[in-house]
Amino acid sequence: MPAPKPDAGRSGVEGTLNEFAHGQGMRRCRYRGQPKAHLQHVLTAIAVNIDRLSGLPLSEEAPTSRRPAAVQTYLDQHRVPRPKSWRSLGT
């Protein structure tokens, strides 16, 4: 019986940890003491996130909204008013 394949979430985490360990030199800590080591880890994570975001293509147009569900389409065709979302009730 073949071994199950790891899910995409785990492989993404493993790739990130590998990038930290090998690409950013996080196997050795530059500072002594847990607070300073934690600060180094946080700042390195921020730098990696900025580096990843800078590599993304710029999008000028707004993201497309998803298609309405079948129930929403039915309500629109029969002119049944939709109730407001619970998120927008206070506004």
Image: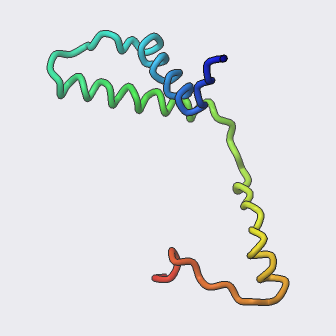
Q: Left of 35 or right of it: where is 40?
A: right
Give the residue displayed 70% in from the left and 56% down from the top. Answer: 62
Give the residue displayed 50% in from the left and 27% down from the top. Answer: 13
Q: Position of residue 10 (x, y in %)?
A: 53, 29
Quadrant of residue 22 within the rendered picture: top left
Q: Name the residue nearer the viewer: 73 or 48.
A: 73
Q: Position of residue 3 (x, y in %)?
A: 61, 18
Is the residue 68 above or below the residue 47 in the image? below
Quadrant of residue 74 within the rendered picture: bottom right
Q: Left of 69 or right of it: where is 38?
A: left
Is the residue 71 above or below the residue 18 in the image? below
Q: Position of residue 9 (x, y in %)?
A: 55, 33
Q: Left of 39 or right of it: where is 34?
A: left
Is the residue 19 above or below the residue 79 in the image? above
Query: Among all residues in the image, which is located at the extreme front?
Result: 1
Give the residue displayed 49% in from the left and 33% down from the top. Answer: 50
Q: Left of 46 or right of it: where is 32?
A: left
Query: Among all residues in the image, which is located at the extreme left?
Result: 33
Is the residue 76 above or below the residue 2 in the image? below
Give the residue displayed 66% in from the left and 17% down from the top. Answer: 2
Q: Position of residue 64 (x, y in %)?
A: 74, 57
Q: Quadrant of the N terminus?
A: top right
Q: Name the residue nearer the viewer: 89 or 6.
A: 6
